[in-house]
Image (cartoon, rainbow, N blue to C red):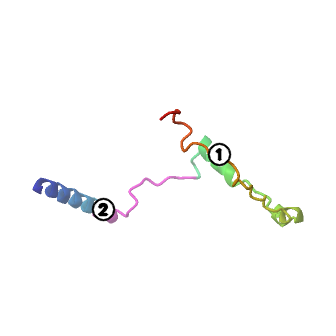
Amino acid sequence: MTKNITTIAVVLILVVAGVWLWMQSGGTGGVPINVSGTSGPTLQLVERLQNIKIDTSFFNDQQFLGLEAAPKTDISGLQKGRPNPFVPKGR
């Protein structure tokens, strides 16, 4: 029991020390990336996706505004099947 408490205390102290050191170093811990000089297929795809413009004027069209939800189907008269159809019959 005391071995577990000691292990937990050591891990907790290490975590606190790591967070403190990370905060003292500025909190980033990463390498700055020059985005303008970076290229590649993934970044080109992201740029293409950012340039997509979607025309949302159809939301104001009278045909769109006149749409109605489909009525719910009445299933009260249908017979219910087995609780789990994937279990072989007889189990």
| Residue 8 left/right relative to 18 | left
Q: Check disc 1 and give the amino acid type.
A: Leu
> Which residue is denoted by mark 2 in the rendering?
19
Could you say whether the residue bearing mark 1 is in a helix, strand or loop?
A: helix
Q: Callout 1 environment at 10 Å: few (<14), some (14 to 19), or many (20+)?
A: few
Q: Camera-side residue: 56 or 59?
A: 59
Q: Callout 2 environment at 10 Å: few (<14), some (14 to 19), or many (20+)?
A: few
Residue at 32 percent of width and 61 percent of height: 22
Q: Camera-side residue: 13 or 18?
A: 13
For residue 44, what is the image quadrant? Answer: top right
Q: Position of residue 39 (x, y in %)?
A: 59, 45
Is residue 33 magenta-colored? Answer: yes
Q: Camera-side residue: 4 or 44?
A: 4
Q: Camera-side residue: 31 or 13?
A: 13
Question: Which residue range is magenta in the image?
Answer: 19-35
> Which residue is denoted by mark 1 in the rendering?
45
| Residue 83 left/right relative to 46 | left
Could you say whether the residue bearing mark 2 is in a helix, strand or loop?
A: helix
Q: Earlier in the sequence, mark 1 or mark 2?
A: 2
Is residue 34 magenta-colored? Answer: yes
For residue 67, what is the image quadrant? Answer: bottom right
Residue at 16 percent of width and 54 percent of height: 4
Q: Calculate the distance from the C-alpha at mark 1 to the C-alpha at mark 2.
A: 36 Å
Q: Check disc 2 and give the amino acid type.
A: Val
Residue at 66 percent of width and 47 percent of height: 79
Magenta region, main secondary structure: loop
Check the image and report above or below for 76 versus 23: above
